[in-house]
Image (cartoon, rainbow, N blue to C red):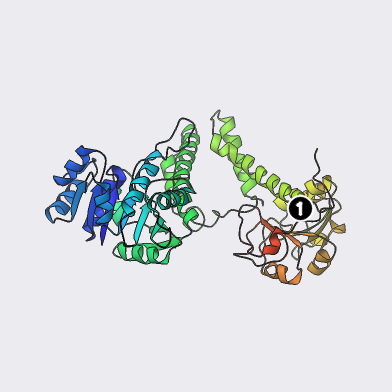
């Protein structure tokens, strides 16, 4: 393919070198005459491992050129990559002026281009930028997005020092697009790169770079806080984290990394609190570890606010134990939810087929006796009975039987804390705790008849 890369800084230079290596003809474009001249002499614009050889090889094979003329770059290519910088302000906002400046140049170039053109945003941008760029190009060019051109979000995940290896051997290649022709072209463009080719929604692709890098930052800080505690105890911190990383079922895995309700149970609350207390006793400040329980409590409060927003006083809680398939109520976030709602005057009915009040023993029994002494009056293993007397059904555990709730109990309000459904066509009101837009039924927009105002204390 013939591609153009607008912006020959770090991302653009690496992309130009690697795409040429993959056999594509590359036209680089930049406002810097020095960068353009460097590329045209077979030299890179950055210092990076392996980049010198790749740029030199591409130059010698006449697979790479650079120009100051963006019109030429767009007209001589099928796909244009926007690779300009998005610097951060002191407040943390992104400066997207360079993105929009390049978009205007592309718009001007497309005015007199007859063939379909794809523009890929490679720079790190906020969700919504793809649409703004598309609107801007359409306005300037007079062309129609989706018909005459397409905008693709194709974020890069490169580390300085290993950028070439990261580009050529990624865990996956990600694009966000709503255009089938663009999807097909990018699948062809990246066909020789190993790893899964992932085509997803535009906004999801735009969000991924921020999620990735913030999680990487979190890992660094978490590792440092664990290291500081270990040092004070004369424990080999690197050995601790080395063993920690060997667990790819739970520790380094998708197991816990799913938006949903708060954590609970006998282990996570107790042990995270113990580690926090240990650090405190050692006079070691661990702000990330300290914030874990605070954030968990905020998620519980978020669930309460969603339930209150429905304006209904009769609430069915589907699942009281801290997770499905168990009767363990210790530190269950559902118990805290029920306790809080009862205190606010809500009428609560609970369904949990795993919890038998008469069979609870030991700390489990003591915990629930202190939290919900009259639990036996409001809990049952009859789902129909709970649904019959309540207006809001709150799913707190992911059980197979709850998949049929929209069919069995139409027009109820469903508050989903566990992402029970991937997508939904439900005539009743549905809301997820940390996700939205999965109910595609227009009846979702019908106004609720509220019988209880939000309780403020």
Residue beneath disc 1: 310
Q: Is residue 138 left or right of residue 410?
A: left
* Residue farthest toward the left in the current orientation of the protein: 60
* Element on which disc 1 rests: loop
Quadrant of image for the N terminus? bottom left
* Residue farthest toward the top in the current orientation of the protein: 283
State the image coordinates of residue 372 (x, y, percent, origin top left): 82, 50
Quadrant of image for the C terminus? top right
> Which quadrant would residue 47 be assigned to in this image?
top left
Q: Nearer the viewer, residue 32 or 203?
A: 32
State the image coordinates of residue 51 (x, y, percent, origin top left): 21, 47
State the image coordinates of residue 180 (x, y, percent, origin top left): 42, 66
Q: Residue at image x 41%, y 45%?
A: 124
Can residue 402 be seen here? The reply is: yes
Q: Eyeballing the image, is 122 above or below 324?
A: above
Can residue 247 be seen here? The reply is: no
Q: Is residue 82 left or right of residue 315?
A: left
Q: Is residue 76 left or right of residue 324?
A: left
Q: Is residue 375 left or right of residue 329?
A: right
Q: Residue at image x 16%, y 44%?
A: 43
Q: Nearer the viewer, residue 67 or 174?
A: 67
Mark 1 closeness class: few <14, some 14–19, many ≥20 residues within 10 Å:
many
State the image coordinates of residue 98 (x, y, percent, origin top left): 37, 40
Number of numbered markers: 1
> Which quadrant would residue 21 be assigned to in this image?
bottom left
């Amino acid at each position: 393919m013939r591609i153009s890369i607008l912006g020959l800084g770090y991302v653009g230079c690496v992309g130009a070198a690697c795409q040429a290596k993959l056999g594509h003809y590359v036209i680089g474009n930049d406002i810097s005459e020095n960068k353009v001249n460097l590329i045209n002499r077979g030299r890179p614009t950055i210092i990076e491992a392996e980049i010198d050889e790749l740029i030199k090889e591409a130059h010698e094979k006449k697979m790479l050129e650079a120009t100051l003329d963006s019109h030429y770059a767009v007209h001589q290519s099928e796909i244009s990559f926007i690779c300009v910088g998005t610097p951060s302000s002191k407040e943390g906002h992104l400066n997207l002026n360079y993105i929009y400046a390049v978009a205007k140049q592309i718009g001007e170039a497309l005015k007199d281009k007859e063939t379909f053109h794809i523009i890929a945003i490679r720079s790190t941008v906020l969700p919504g930028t793809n649409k703004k760029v598309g609107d801007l190009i359409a306005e300037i060019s007079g062309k129609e997005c989706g018909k005459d051109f397409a905008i693709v979000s194709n974020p890069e995940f490169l580390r300085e020092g290993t950028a070439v290896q990261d580009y050529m051997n990624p865990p996956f290649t990600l694009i966000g697009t709503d255009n089938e022709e663009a999807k097909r072209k990018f699948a062809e463009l990246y066909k020789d790169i190993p790893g899964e080719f992932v085509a997803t929604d535009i906004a999801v692709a735009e969000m991924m770079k921020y999620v990735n890098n913030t999680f990487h930052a979190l890992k660094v800080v978490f590792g440092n806080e664990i290291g500081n505690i270990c040092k004070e105890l004369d424990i080999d911190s690197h050995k601790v984290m080395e063993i920690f990383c060997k667990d790819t079922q739970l520790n380094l895995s998708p197991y816990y990394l799913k938006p949903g309700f708060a954590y609970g149970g006998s282990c996570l609350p107790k042990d995270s609190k113990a580690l926090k207390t240990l650090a405190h006793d050692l006079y070691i400040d661990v702000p990330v570890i300290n914030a874990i329980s605070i954030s968990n409590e905020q998620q519980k409060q978020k669930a309460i606010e969603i339930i209150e927003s429905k304006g209904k006083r009769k609430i069915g809680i589907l699942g009281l134990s801290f997770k499905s398939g168990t009767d363990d109520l210790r530190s269950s976030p559902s118990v805290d939810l029920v306790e809080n709602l009862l205190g606010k005057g809500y009428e609560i009915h609970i369904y949990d087929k795993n919890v038998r009040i008469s069979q609870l023993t030991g700390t489990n029994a003591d915990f629930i006796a202190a939290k919900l002494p009259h639990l036996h009056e409001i809990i049952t293993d009859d789902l129909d009975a709970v649904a019959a007397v309540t207006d809001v059904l709150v799913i707190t555990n992911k059980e197979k039987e709850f998949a049929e709730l929209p069919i069995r109990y139409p027009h109820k309000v469903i508050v989903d804390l566990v992402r029970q459904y991937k997508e939904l066509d439900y005539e009743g009101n549905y809301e997820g705790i940390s996700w939205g837009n999965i109910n595609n039924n227009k009846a979702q927009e019908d106004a609720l008849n509220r019988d209880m105002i939000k309780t403020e204390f």
